[in-house]
């Protein structure tokens, strides 16, 4: 652990020590609540299975009669995980990597873990992304160096440290601002990780659905109308795509209800009989039909129950009302846990006091 990391840990312990016993007790309860994870076959299991298959490429020999090593390793592939904001992409990948026996210490600085995750800066360009990867790999480099020099050092550093997996989170941050030349450059840089004859690595790219066109179709011709190298196809054929779907009603109501009931029980609370039919549909709508956001709202509702005087023994719709009000500062007139016609509410809105104000913002396009 670096001195900076040690200093940061010390600051956190100072903050913890400054809390009252009651605050620390509540913190402990919420830690246990948030540790309860809803795992599903079409999300967690599918992604973990796909990731496992890509890891197998790392130890696949091209020539079975020769020893495994440089020059006798298969090309690798990239896992492209897409989903809307709040779908839970980053959390799920962190769980999968942390649970894998090949990656002990994932997410812990200087642990020697063979997988590394890098949050793509925003705004970003190819050079800035390379510099950020080097920073995470404890090799600071100034941006004055060329893009080629930065990324050559990235590849050298990854091989030197024996990293097997490179996860680029929020990859849309670099793709959404790149011009055509930079997009082609990014595809070429990514490909080099997959086809390296000495140290190929598995790439994991996670981001919004808007990243999909980065891989689709053919490259545009150059200024003279001549075809450009097919960098889209070169990356696309080496990638596996896993989309995280949004929640659906009533299909997913029972699943979400089971998760909420489980989390509430950890906090010592029961749930009402109408959880599945009344509370959960409103929770899914308030969470914009994304699992990660809906679970966050459920955490906050349980927190409201813990803060009540006396503490709530039952998790009821009132706690969800309070959590939504605290999160958005919207009045009850536009609170999906209060109004009867909650399906008509636009839950991307904040700071709205009336239905008229919410409708005006929706018509003006201020919500999206």
Image (tube, rainbow, N blue to C red):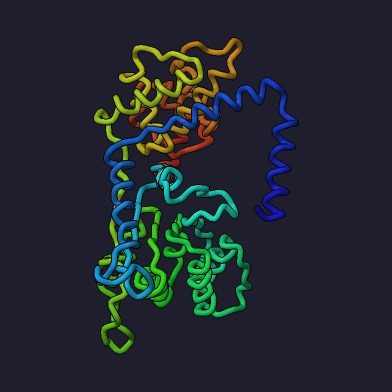
In this rendered view, identify the residue nearer to me: 356 or 297: 297
Horizontally, residue 293 falls left or right of residue 217, namely: right
Position of residue 203 measured from the top left corner of the image (x, y, whole percent): 39, 61
Horizontally, residue 137 falls left or right of residue 238, namely: right
Residue at 40% over, 54% down? 207
In this rendered view, identify the residue nearer to me: 158 or 47: 158
In this rendered view, identify the residue nearer to me: 163 or 146: 163
Position of residue 361 measured from the top left corner of the image (x, y, whole percent): 45, 41
Horizontally, residue 177 falls left or right of residue 230, namely: right
State whether residue 38 is above or below residue 209: above
Position of residue 298 measured from the top left corner of the image (x, y, whole percent): 45, 27
Position of residue 288 measured from the top left corner of the image (x, y, whole percent): 38, 37
Work out which residue is located at the far bottom of the displayed protein and give it: 224
Specify whether residue 183 is in view.
no
Residue at 44% over, 69% down? 178
Residue at 74% over, 37% down? 14
Instruction: Give the tally of numbered discs.
Output: 0
State whether residue 42 is above or below residue 254: below
Specify whether residue 216 is in view.
yes
In this rendered view, identify the residue nearer to me: 50 or 335: 50
State whether residue 342 is above or below residue 182: above
Quarter assignment of residue 221? bottom left
């Amino acid at each position: 652990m670096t001195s900076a990391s040690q200093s940061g840990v010390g600051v956190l312990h100072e903050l913890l020590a400054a809390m009252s016993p009651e605050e620390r007790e509540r913190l402990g309860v919420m830690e246990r609540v948030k540790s309860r994870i809803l795992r599903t076959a079409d999300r967690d299991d599918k992604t973990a299975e796909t990731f496992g298959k890509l890891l197998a490429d790392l130890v696949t020999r091209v020539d079975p009669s020769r020893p495994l090593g440089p020059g006798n390793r298969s090309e690798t592939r990239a896992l492209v995980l897409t989903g809307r904001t709040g779908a839970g992409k980053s959390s799920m990948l962190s769980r999968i990597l942390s649970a894998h026996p090949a990656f002990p210490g994932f997410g812990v600085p200087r642990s020697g873990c063979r997988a590394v995750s890098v949050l793509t800066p925003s705004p970003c360009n190819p050079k800035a992304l390379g510099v950020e990867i080097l920073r995470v790999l404890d090799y600071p480099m100034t941006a004055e160096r060329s893009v080629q020099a930065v990324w050559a050092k990235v590849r050298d550093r990854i091989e030197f440290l024996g990293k097997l997996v490179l996860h680029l989170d929020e990859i849309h941050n670099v793709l959404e601002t790149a011009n055509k030349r930079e997009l082609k450059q990014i595809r070429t840089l990514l490909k080099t990780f997959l086809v390296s004859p000495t140290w190929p690595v598995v790439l994991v790219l996670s981001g919004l659905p808007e990243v999909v066109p980065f891989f689709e179709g053919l490259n545009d011709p150059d200024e003279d109308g001549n075809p450009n190298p097919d960098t889209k196809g070169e990356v696309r054929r080496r990638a596996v795509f896993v989309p995280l779907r949004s929640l659906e009603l009533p299909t997913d109501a029972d699943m979400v209800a089971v998760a909420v009931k489980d989390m509430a029980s950890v906090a010592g609370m029961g749930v009402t009989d109408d959880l599945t039919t009344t509370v959960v549909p409103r929770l899914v709508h308030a969470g914009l039909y994304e699992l990660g956001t809906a679970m966050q709202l459920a955490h906050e509702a349980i927190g409201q129950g813990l803060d009540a005087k006396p503490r709530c023994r039952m998790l009821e719709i009132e706690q969800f009302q309070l959590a939504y009000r605290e999160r958005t500062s919207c009045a009850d007139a536009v609170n999906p846990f209060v109004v009867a016609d909650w399906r008509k509410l636009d839950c991307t809105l904040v700071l709205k006091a009336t239905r008229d104000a919410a409708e005006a913002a929706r018509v003006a396009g201020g919500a999206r």
